[in-house]
Amino acid sequence: MLHLLVTISKYTIMIMFAIYTYDCFAVLRRGMSQWRRERMYKKQTTLIYLILLNANAVLLCTTMDFRILIMSLAEMIFIALTLLIYNKIYKGASLSVVNNMCMLLTISFIVLTRLNMNQAIRQFGLACVALVITCLIPLFISKLKFLSYLSFLYALIGIGGLGVVAIAGSTEYGAKLNISLGPVTIQPSEFIKILFVFFVASVLYEWEDLSELIYATAVAMLHVLLLIASKDLGGAAIFLVTYLAMIYVATKKPIILIGGLGLGAIGSFLAYKLFTHVQNRVIAWLDPLSVIDNQGYQVSQSLFAIGTGGWFGSGLGQGMPDKIPVVTKDFVFAAISEEMGGVVALCLIFVCISCLLMFFNISMSVKDSFYKLVALGLGTVYGIQVFLTLGGVTKFIPSTGVTLPLVSYGGSSLLSTMILFAVIQGLYIIRNDQESEVEDGKTKRTKRNRSN
Amino acid sequence: MARQREPKEIEVIDLNPKNNKKKKKAKTKKRPVEPMIQEEEESVKKVSRNREFAVITYGFLALFITLSAYFCYFLGFQSEDFINNPYNARISQLSNSIIRGDILSSDGQTLATSYIDDEGNEVRSYPFGNVFAHSVGYNTNGLMGAELDGNFYMLRSHSFILNQILNDLKDEKSKGDSIVTTLNASLQQSAYEAMGFYDGAVIALEPSTGKILCMISKPDFDPNTIAANYESIATDTESSVLLNRSIAGLYPPGSTFKILTALEYLNENGNDEDMFDCNGSYTSDGYEIHCYGNKSHGQETFLEAFGNSCNVVFSQVGLSLNLREFGSLANQLLFNQTLPTKLSNVKASTFSLEDGASNSLIMQTSIGQGDTLVTPMHMAMIASSVCNDGECMMPYIIDSVQNDEGTLVEQYEEESYGNILTSVQADELETYMRYVVTDGTASKLQSDLYEAFGKTGSAEYNSNKDETHSWFVGYAKSGDKEIAVAVVLEGAGSGSAYAVPVAKTMFDTYFGY
């Protein structure tokens, strides 16, 4: 009986998620009327609620943990509030971005409830806190004009923060990532990523001479070196690629991008030669099964999960995602793929792509060149992080130990990603204000035409 | 008012700079002349600015599309290696809701089946007992054979969906899918009986597809009782009962290796017109080689020497060969590497003869002694490739998967490894291996039903030269029907006396005696 319920739920969630994902891209079609577009977003919102209810019902039946009832209610309210803030209170926020944020959080709530109830509750609490903190960010972004003058401050906090971690950080899975402040542990690099983007943007958005490029490059490399010193190679890769993308766009010189990526490749090769932990990751990537007792254990378990789950998944609560070490953080994608199915996992990748396109879209259409660079940088940070984690979990690339934004368990990652999304929403609001000025002008003109 | 103020195209992404330009142009046309020039300049600026954004966006898109494609490829084609891995704990969990499926032979016999006993326990039974011990394997204290290779399929159910739902509601297990093997039960049984009381291995392949028709290893065990006897069987290191000798037993090849020596000689010499003289023994650097039974073959051609399995001629020829070329020929014929099969736990054969090897080692190696070790599977694959015009098909044992009512779920296709011999080389070897049957040591295989080809061998395996493993490697064909075999009987004696009759029984059965 239970099995039947799980199976029905599995397929319905899959279909709903597939429709949701299709709409993410269908809505981009040119010439679609505003009215139809809005209806599609409403449909997406409905699907989010339905998926959440559907999955929570199954989780309740399989675990008989009645806290799930309260959680479901709270999660629905949370999503409703988020949608209210970005749909109604802020004018001009991207409905696609807010829907995707809610969808990714919903998947996160579902999979964490499945994997670890305590972590799910904690994560939900953190999401509420993050929502409160970040709901004012779009307002700040659109009103504060001095953000582009603070380059020195961004660099100081960034380097200071990473320096402290490199010296006093606590080691976890071979990398120094965290700082303990009493009862809370924070991962400063998650926040410094965003400051770093603001730093690079504030230096490069109207660079004039070489000294500014050298200054930006030096500070950027200092960030990267500090991360390498903390053995956070995933972090180093994110900072490096983000910097390259931003300087390429700012200078319009393809040679910088190509050269930078080339240097990055040489750097990776050197890191491989020098550090045993890098070699271990590469060995585990090339043939995880041959070293399954050692370096390959985690990746093998992840691939067992993804492979056995197959296209349609085993159903919530029916797999063995607990066999994967750190499944709620770096390897959450494998748990999703195992129990909810490869199709859902694939949809998840496309929802992330949809977010990414919206980030690059705003970076192209916002007028202010500082914010153009900020949006591009944040998009790159998000894109490269998603790519590193998904690639690592699926053995497409060596695993680098980064989290899947919004989905993985972890307060710093959640809060920083919600800040990132809020900044992007701020830029959409700025663009909306600009365009509505133009729009106003147009309306006046058409009125005049009509009266003629 | 608020609604009107919302922009018309909130989220249209335009990555194409040209489109942007057009749009701008279109807009600007309606405007007065002076600002148009300005706008035009602006739009040119915008185009060049957007190019970098497009590069980054398309770069990311390409990355993610590749990732998604890889993910699909993994799920579709690569995941089976991981699913069937013994470390994957998820498989055994499936047996909570599924009754393990049956294993069937290609001729419709049930080789393994499961039923629920009176106490509600699932029991695995093997109707043929010892005959399929290693090929079908077991499912207790680990897995082996087809039970291992088909594990995942037998724990999935494609039973009629309503039945599954009904079972689900009744909280009963559904019947898992059956795997249909390539094994031919009557062939297996007749070969098993023909082996008599000898230990050893027999394997038969269908050359055109790589289907494993028969696979026997002795000493064997009864899979029905292995759970109870596991301790004593597994700890008996002397006879290694659990080792599947047909794919993991490493034997000296004896004279069957002359197939390679002959091929290398033909490659280097270009023709086989030279005459040789055999007086029963040959000595070089103080090392003496005898022909089997100290027989002297007199004047003979190279073809006759192959047919007589003349050690004198082959050790002489061996000394003349380019060892580096010989080594690369062995590698081309799949020595020193994992054999390309679809089975688990297949051992690699070994061959090494380096420059500067002693004459005695070269002589021994040329007649299949020395350090060379082969698996019966490997020798059967070589025979199969000769038969198949040089193309090596990858041996496999799972032909298809069907549900509990016999409806096909999945059909596995044969897969080629590629040519390990040129068709000229295959033709040459065919002539030589046919001569062994018409005029040489395997003359017992002459038959009206089929045309047989092969090479016998008597492999010394310890210092007592009278004790030898009896070998036969070869194939037979009649019309479209073909079969390649490798037979090894441990300590039996000469190949022609013991292994050849086993091959004959198999050929007779297969071609319908």
Image (tube, rainbow, N blue to C red):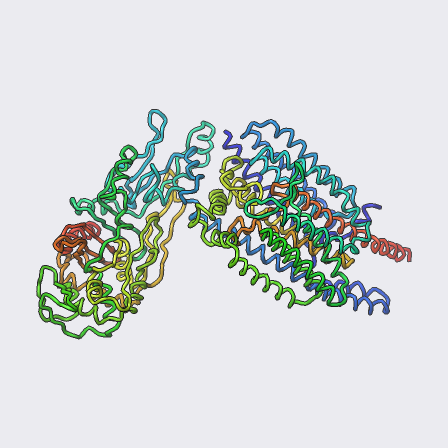
Residue at left offset 72%, top offset 66%:
B48
Where is residue B375 shown, x and y percent of the image?
27, 54
Which residue lies at the image location 32% right of the left edge and 53% below the top edge?
B395
Relative image position of residue A297 (x, y in whole percent): 47, 45
Q: Nearer the viewer, residue A66 or A87?
A: A66
Left or right of A79: which side holds A277? Answer: left
Residue B61's quadrant in the figure? bottom right
Camera-side residue: B20 or B367? B367
Q: Name the residue nearer the viewer: B248 or B382.
A: B248
Question: In the rendered image of this protein, does residue A317 appear above or below residue B5?
Answer: above
- Residue A65 visible in rendering: yes
Residue B300 appears left or right of B66: left
Q: Pick out the residue farthest to the front.
A: A167
- Looking at the rendered structure, the number of numbered marks drawn on it comes to 0
Is residue A424 rendered to the left or right of residue B381? right
Residue at 42 percent across and 39 percent down: it is B91
Residue B292: x and y in percent read 12, 60
Q: Residue furthest right?
A: A452
Can residue A36 be seen in this snapshot? Answer: no
Q: Position of residue A289 (x, y in %)?
A: 43, 49
Q: Seen from this angle, which residue lies furthest top?
A: B119
Left or right relative to A133: residue B324: left
